[in-house]
Image: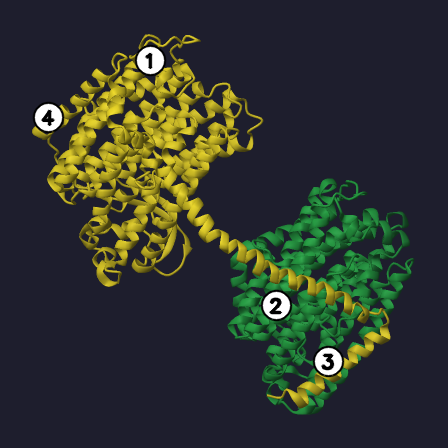
Chain colours: A yellow, B green
C-alpha cells in the first residue's frame, strides 16, 4: 500500500510555518489566522483519511494490524545501521495523528478569538504551525533518530511558545526552565539511543520491536552493573520520556510552562507534547516488555504511579487554576505510564497498553477542553486565581456546561469517555499489581475532589463583584469547546481494544462491574466532598488547611522541589564545581595564554629588522638557507 | 601520436587558443571600445572553466614529458575557478585603470600565459617540461607586478620579483642538473627507479627544493613575498599568493610522493623543520602588519606552513588533505583579497586602521571579510576549520604530535591577528570610516562565488571523498 501521501500531514504545517514566518510583516493578522486554520484542516482531513484507510480498508492482514513503513535512507553508517527519514503507520501512530490534528485544529480556531488584538498574532500562528509540524513528525517517525530530531523540535517550539510573551520575565524564565530541564532529560534519551544503536545495530522501530528479532532475543549478551545494556538503554530513553512527560522528579518545568498563552497550554502541555513520553514507551513497548523480563517497564510503572499520586496531592492546594490543571495533567500522564507499566503483551493481558492509549486519547480531549474553558474564564475575568472568580455560571453558560462535562469525565463518571478509559487502567492495575491499583483508586478520588474544587470555585462559590461584568466568549472560542465536549461525551463508546493493542491483534474488552463500581464510588465521594467544601463559601476549607498545618504548607509549596533544584544547581554545582573550574580557567589557562600572547608580540617586535627590503639581503638568506639545509641534511641529520 | 592524443592536452590548447584570440581581438577592437576586451576575456575564460569540467583520460604523451590524470585535471579545474574569481574581482580595476593606459589585453595575455605555465608545470613528466613550466609561470607575473608603471613601488616590486625568481630558478636548475648527473635521466619515471640517497642526490634535491620553496614562499626563501605583494597591484598579489602558491605546493607534493619517495626519510625531517619555521615566522610578522596587503602576505606564508603539515604524512590521506586545504585556501584568500581589492579600488585605502567602522557603512562587505578571516583562521563551521582539522588529522595519524601541537599554537597566534581585523571592522567606530559604496556586478559575483565556496566546502563532504578517491594514485 502506498502511504506516501501521509508525508503531507507534517509538511503542510511546515509550509504554513515558513509562509507565516517569512512574510510575518506582510500578512494581515486576520489572514494569518485563516491560513493557519486552513493548513491544519487539511492535515486533519488527511489524518482522518489515513485512519479510515488503515483501520477499515488496508491495515488488517489475517487479523493483525500490520506496520506500514515508507522511508528513504539519509545517512549510512554500516549495512544495518543507518538513519532513515520516513513515515511509519500503525494503530498508535494513527491514533496520535487523530489526537494531534483534532486538538491542534481546535486550538487554532480557538486562538483566533483568544489572541485577537495581540501584537504577535502572526508569529503566534507560525509557531503553532511549527509545533504541529514537529509533533506530526514525531508521531510518524520510523526510527529512534528521526523521533529524536522531532523530539527536539517540539522542545524548541514549546520553548518558543512558553516564552511567547517575551517581555514578561516570568515567561522567559519559564521557557528557559522548560527547555533546560527537558534538554537535560534528553541527554539521557540521546545516550540511550546511541547505546541501543551500538548494541543492536539498528535504529529502526520495526526491527527493534520484533519479538523474535535479534534486538530482543539477544538482550542478555552484554551486561553492565548487573543489568543488560539494552535495559540501560531503555531506562535512559525513559528518562528522556519522563522529562518530556513531566514525570517525577523531572516535573518541575510543567507548572511554570503555564506562563505561555492558554491555547498553547491546551495544545502542548495537556494534549500532545507532554504525552510524547508515553508515546515513546508505547512505541518501544515490545522492547520494554521482553527485555530482561520487563525490568525497565517496572520502573515506568512505579515512576508513573508515584508521579500520579504526588501531582494529585499538590493539585488540591493550588490556587492558580492553570496550575491545578498542570498538576492534573502530570497526574493523568502518570496514570498512563503506570498503565503501560503493568501491561502484558498478548490478548487481554495487554489491557494496560490498550487502556493507556485509550486514556491518552480521551484525556487529550477533555484536558484540552478544560484548558480551553479555563482560558475562556481567564479571558473573561483577567486573572488566573481562584480568589478572583466565583459565580461565573450566570455569565458564561457554555463555558460552564462544557467545563462541567470535562470535569465529570476526568472524575470518571459514567458514561463519559473518562469513565471507560480509567476503568480499563484500573482493571489492568488490579490484575497485575495490587499496590498500584490502590494508588490508582486513591488518585481517582483525589482527581474528582480537586477538579470539582476548581469547578465549584470558578462557577459557583462566592458571588464575586466584578469591575467589568464578565461575558461569554465569542463563537470562535466556544465552538472548539463544544466540539471537544461532544467528543468527550461520546469518545468512550469507541471500541478501542479492537483497534489498538500491544500485539496488534485486537481483543474484546469487558466492563469489570465490581471495579467500576468501586471507582465510581470513590469518584463520587470526591465530588461530594468538594460540593460540601466549595459549593457555597464556608470555613471548612480553611479549617482543614489549618488542621493539616505543615503538610498543607508543604503541599502548597509543591514539596519544595523547585527550591531543592535551585539549591543543587546554585549552591552545589555553581559554587563547589563551577566556581573552582572558572578560577582555574581564568588564572591558569587564560594566564598561560596571555603569557604566550605577550611573548609573541615581544618576539615579533624584535625580529622585524630581518625584513630589510633589500634584495641582496634576501638573496643572501636564500643562499644561506640552501647551504644550511644542505649541511644539516647531508652531514648531521642522516637517519 | 595522432590528433586524439593532442586532445588530452585540452586545457592547455584551449588556454593557448584564448591567448591567441585575445591577441587578434586587440587588433580588431576599435579604440573607443577598448574596455570590451575585459568582457571578452572573462567570457572566454568562463567557457574554458566550464569546458574544463569534462572528464579526461589518464595519459602520458610526448614520450612521457607530459602526463595527466584525474587528480591533476581536477586541480587544473580548481586553478581555473580561482583565476576566474580573480578576473571577476579585478575586472573593474582593469577597466578603470589598465584599459585607460591601453594595456588591457596584455594583462590578460600575461596572466593566462602564467597559468599556462602552471598547467605545464603540474602536468610535467620530466624536468625539462617542469622547468619550462616553472619559468613560464613566473616571468609574466614579474611583468604584471610592475604593471602600475606610474607607481614607483610597483616597479620595485617587479624588479624584486624578477631578481629573486631568477636566483631561485638558477638554483633550482643547478639542483636539476645534479639530479640528472646522479640518475642519468630527466624523466620522472626513470628517476624513480634509480634515485638513491647519495650525498650528491641530496644536494641536488635540496637545491631543487629551494627553487620550489621560493614559489610557495617557505622560510627562509620567503623574503620577497611581503615587498612584492605590497607593491604589486592587488590582483597580482592575490594571484601570487593563491594560484601560484597553490600550484607550486601541488607539484611539490606530487614530486615528493613520486620521484623523491625513496628520500622520504630526508625530506620528512626537512619539511618538519621548515614547516615549523614557516608557521612561526609568517605568524610573527603578520602580527604587526598595518598594510592589509602585507598582512595577507605574511598570513599566506603561515598558511603555507600548514600545507607542509599535510605533505609530511606522505599518504593518500595526506594528498587528499593538501588538495582539499589548498582549495579552501584559494576560496578564503580570494575572498579576503577581493574585499581589499574592492575597497582599495574605490578609495585607495589599504591600511587596517582604514577598516575601522566598516561594518556600519558596508555591512555586506565586512561580513564577507569576516567569513574569509574565520575560514583562514580555521573557526568552525566554515570550510577553513575542516581544512585545518583534516591536515592535523593527517599529520597526527603519522605520529607527528609535537608538530601538530606547534601548529595548534600557531593557529592560536593567527587567530589573534585575524581577529584584529575583525575588531577593527566590527567593534571600532573609526573617526573616518569608509563611506558606503556599491560594488559592480563582476566584483559582486566574484565575492559571492568565494562565499559560496567557503560555506559549501565546509558542509559538503562528498567533495572530500571524491578527492580522496582521486588521490589513491599517490598512495
Work out whether B188 lies above or below B50: below
The percent coordinates of residue A463 (x first, y second) are 33, 9
Q: Earlier in the sequence, mark 4 or mark 1?
A: 1
- The answer to whether tags 4 and 2 share a subunit is no
Q: Position of residue A223 (x, y in %)?
A: 25, 61
Disc 3 vs disc 1: which is toward the camera?
1
- The residues bearing labels 2 and 3 have C-alpha atoms spaced at a distance of 36 Å
State the quadrant of the N terminus of chain A. Answer: top left
User: Residue A342: horizontal and vertical position, in percent?
Assistant: 17, 42
Residue where numbered disc 4 is placed: A517
User: Does label 2 or label 3 sit earlier along the sequence?
Assistant: 3
Q: Label 2 belongs to which residue?
A: B407
Q: Are marks 3 and 1 on the same chain?
A: no
At 51% from the left and 26% from the top, the residue drawn is A122
Is residue B115 visible in the rendered image? The answer is no
10 Å crowding of disc 3: few (<14), some (14-19), many (20+): some
- Which residue is denoted by mark 1 in the rendering? A390
Identify the element where label 1 is drawn. loop
Amino acid at each position: 500500500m502506498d502511504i506516501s501521501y501521509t508525508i503531507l500531514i507534517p509538511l503542510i504545517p511546515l509550509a504554513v510555518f515558513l509562509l507565516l514566518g517569512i512574510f510575518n510583516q506582510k500578512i494581515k493578522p486576520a489572514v494569518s489566522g485563516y491560513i493557519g486554520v486552513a493548513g491544519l484542516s487539511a492535515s486533519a482531513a488527511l489524518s482522518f483519511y489515513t485512519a479510515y484507510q488503515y483501520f477499515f480498508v488496508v491495515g488488517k492482514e489475517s487479523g493483525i494490524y500490520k506496520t506500514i513503513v515508507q522511508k528513504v535512507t539519509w545517512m549510512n553508517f554500516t549495512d544495518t545501521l543507518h538513519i532513515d527519514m520516513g513515515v511509519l503507520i500503525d494503530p498508535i501512530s494513527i491514533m496520535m495523528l487523530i489526537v494531534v490534528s483534532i486538538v491542534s485544529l481546535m486550538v487554532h480556531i480557538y486562538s483566533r478569538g483568544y489572541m485577537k488584538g495581540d501584537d504577535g498574532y502572526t508569529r503566534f500562528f507560525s509557531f503553532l504551525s511549527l509545533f504541529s509540524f514537529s509533533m506530526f513528525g514525531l508521531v510518524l517517525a520510523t526510527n529512534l533518530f528521526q523521533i529524536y530530531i522531532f523530539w527536539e523540535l517540539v522542545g524548541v517550539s514549546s520553548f518558543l511558545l512558553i516564552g511567547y510573551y517575551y517581555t514578561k520575565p516570568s515567561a522567559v524564565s519559564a521557557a528557559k526552565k522548560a527547555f533546560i530541564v527537558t534538554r537535560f532529560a534528553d541527554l539521557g534519551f540521546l545516550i540511550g539511543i546511541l547505546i541501543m544503536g551500538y548494541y543492536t545495530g539498528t535504529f529502526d522501530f520495526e526491527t527493534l520491536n520484533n519479538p523474535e528479532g535479534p534486538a530482543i532475543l539477544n538482550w542478555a549478551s552484554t551486561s553492565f552493573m548487573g543489568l543488560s545494556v539494552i535495559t540501560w538503554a531503555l531506562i535512559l530513553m525513559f528518562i528522556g520520556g519522563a522529562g518530556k512527560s513531566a514525570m517525577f522528579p523531572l516535573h518541575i518545568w510543567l507548572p511554570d510552562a503555564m506562563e505561555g498563552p492558554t491555547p498553547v497550554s491546551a495544545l502542548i502541555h495537556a494534549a500532545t507534547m507532554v504525552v510524547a513520553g508515553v508515546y515513546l514507551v508505547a512505541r518501544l513497548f515490545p522492547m520494554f516488555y521482553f527485555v530482561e523480563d520487563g525490568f525497565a517497564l517496572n520502573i515506568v510503572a512505579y515512576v508513573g504511579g508515584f508521579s500520579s499520586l504526588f501531582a494529585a496531592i499538590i493539585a488540591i492546594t493550588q490556587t492558580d487554576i492553570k496550575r491545578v490543571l498542570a498538576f492534573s495533567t502530570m497526574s493523568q500522564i502518570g496514570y498512563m505510564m503506570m498503565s503501560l507499566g503493568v501491561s502484558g503483551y498478548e490478548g487481554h493481558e495487554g489491557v494496560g497498553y490498550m487502556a493507556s492509549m485509550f486514556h491518552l486519547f480521551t484525556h487529550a480531549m477533555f484536558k484540552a477542553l478544560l484548558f480551553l474553558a479555563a482560558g475562556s474564564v481567564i479571558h473573561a475575568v483577567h486573572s488566573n486565581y481562584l480568589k478572583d472568580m466565583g459565580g461565573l455560571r450566570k455569565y458564561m453558560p457554555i463555558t460552564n456546561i462544557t467545563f462541567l462535562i470535562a470535569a465529570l469525565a476526568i472524575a470518571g463518571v459514567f458514561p463519559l469517555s473518562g469513565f471507560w478509559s480509567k476503568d480499563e487502567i484500573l482493571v489492568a492495575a488490579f490484575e497485575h499489581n495490587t499496590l498500584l491499583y490502590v494508588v490508582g483508586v486513591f488518585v481517582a478520588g483525589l482527581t474528582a475532589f480537586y477538579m470539582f474544587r476548581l469547578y465549584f470555585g470558578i462557577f459557583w462559590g462566592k458571588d464575586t463583584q466584578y469591575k467589568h461584568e464578565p461575558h461569554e466568549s465569542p463563537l470562535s472560542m466556544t465552538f472548539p469547546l463544544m466540539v471537544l465536549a461532544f467528543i468527550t461525551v461520546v469518545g468512550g463508546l469507541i471500541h478501542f481494544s479492537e483497534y489498538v493493542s500491544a500485539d496488534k491483534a485486537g481483543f474484546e474488552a469487558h466492563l469489570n462491574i465490581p471495579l467500576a463500581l468501586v471507582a465510581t464510588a470513590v469518584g463520587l465521594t470526591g465530588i461530594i466532598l468538594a460540593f460540601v467544601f466549595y459549593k457555597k463559601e464556608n470555613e471548612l476549607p480553611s479549617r482543614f488547611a489549618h488542621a493539616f498545618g505543615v503538610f498543607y504548607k508543604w503541599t502548597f509549596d509543591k514539596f519544595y522541589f523547585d527550591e531543592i533544584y535551585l539549591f543543587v544547581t546554585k549552591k552545589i554545582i555553581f559554587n563547589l564545581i563551577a566556581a573552582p573550574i572558572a578560577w582555574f580557567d581564568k588564572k591558569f589557562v587564560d594566564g598561560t595564554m596571555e603569557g604566550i600572547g605577550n611573548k609573541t608580540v615581544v618576539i615579533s617586535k624584535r625580529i622585524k629588522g630581518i625584513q630589510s627590503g633589500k634584495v641582496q639581503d634576501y638573496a643572501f638568506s636564500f643562499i644561506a638557507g640552501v647551504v644550511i639545509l644542505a649541511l644539516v641534511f647531508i652531514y648531521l641529520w642522516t637517519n | 601520436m595522432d590528433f586524439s592524443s593532442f586532445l588530452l592536452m585540452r586545457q592547455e590548447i584551449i588556454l593557448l587558443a584564448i591567448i591567441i584570440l585575445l591577441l587578434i581581438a586587440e587588433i580588431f577592437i576599435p579604440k573607443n571600445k577598448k574596455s570590451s576586451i575585459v568582457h571578452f576575456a572573462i567570457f572566454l575564460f568562463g567557457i574554458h572553466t566550464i569546458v574544463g569540467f569534462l572528464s579526461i583520460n589518464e595519459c602520458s604523451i610526448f614520450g612521457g614529458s607530459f602526463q595527466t590524470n584525474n587528480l591533476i585535471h581536477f586541480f587544473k579545474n580548481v586553478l581555473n575557478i580561482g583565476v576566474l574569481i580573480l578576473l571577476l574581482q579585478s575586472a573593474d580595476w582593469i577597466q578603470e585603470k589598465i584599459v585607460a593606459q591601453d594595456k588591457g589585453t596584455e594583462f590578460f595575455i600575461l596572466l593566462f600565459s602564467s597559468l599556462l605555465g602552471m598547467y605545464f608545470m603540474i602536468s610535467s613528466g620530466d624536468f625539462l617540461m617542469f622547468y619550462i613550466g616553472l619559468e613560464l609561470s613566473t616571468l609574466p607575473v614579474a611583468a604584471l607586478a610592475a604593471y602600475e608603471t606610474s607607481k614607483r613601488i610597483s616597479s620595485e616590486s617587479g624588479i624584486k620579483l624578477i631578481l629573486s625568481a631568477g636566483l631561485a630558478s638558477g638554483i633550482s636548475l643547478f639542483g636539476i642538473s645534479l639530479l640528472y648527473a646522479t640518475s642519468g635521466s630527466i624523466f620522472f619515471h626513470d628517476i624513480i627507479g634509480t634515485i638513491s640517497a647519495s650525498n650528491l642526490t641530496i644536494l641536488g634535491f635540496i637545491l631543487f627544493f629551494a627553487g620550489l620553496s621560493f614559489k610557495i614562499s617557505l622560510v627562509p626563501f620567503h623574503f620577497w613575498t611581503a615587498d612584492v605583494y605590497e607593491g604589486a597591484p592587488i590582483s597580482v598579489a592575490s594571484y601570487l599568493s593563491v594560484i601560484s602558491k597553490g600550484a607550486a605546493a601541488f607539484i611539490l607534493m606530487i614530486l615528493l610522493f613520486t620521484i623523491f619517495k625513496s628520500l622520504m626519510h630526508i625530506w620528512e625531517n626537512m619539511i618538519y623543520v621548515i614547516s615549523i619555521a614557516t608557521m612561526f615566522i609568517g605568524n610573527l610578522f603578520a602580527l604587526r602588519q598595518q598594510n592589509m596587503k602585507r598582512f595577507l602576505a605574511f598570513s599566506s606564508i603561515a598558511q603555507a606552513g600548514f600545507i607542509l603539515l599535510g605533505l609530511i604524512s606522505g599518504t593518500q590521506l595526506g594528498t587528499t588533505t593538501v588538495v582539499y586545504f589548498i582549495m579552501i585556501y584559494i576560496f578564503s584568500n580570494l575572498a579576503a583579497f577581493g574585499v581589499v581589492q574592492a575597497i582599495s579600488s574605490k578609495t585607495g585605502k589599504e591600511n587596517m586602521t582604514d577598516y575601522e567602522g566598516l561594518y556600519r557603512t558596508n555591512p555586506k562587505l565586512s561580513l564577507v571579510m569576516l567569513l574569509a578571516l574565520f575560514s583562514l583562521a580555521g573557526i568552525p563551521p566554515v570550510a577553513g576549520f575542516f581544512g585545518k582539522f583534516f591536515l592535523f588529522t593527517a599529520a597526527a595519524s603519522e605520529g607527528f604530535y609535537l608538530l601538530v601541537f606547534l601548529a595548534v599554537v600557531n593557529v592560536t597566534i593567527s587567530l589573534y591577528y585575524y581577529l584584529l581585523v575583525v575588531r577593527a571592522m566590527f567593534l571600532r567606530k573609526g573617526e573616518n570610516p569608509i563611506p558606503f559604496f556599491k560594488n559592480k556586478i563582476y566584483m559582486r559575483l566574484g565575492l559571492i562565488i568565494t562565499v559560496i565556496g567557503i560555506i559549501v566546502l565546509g558542509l559538503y563532504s562528498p567533495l572530500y571523498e571524491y578527492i580522496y578517491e582521486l588521490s589513491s594514485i599517490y598512495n
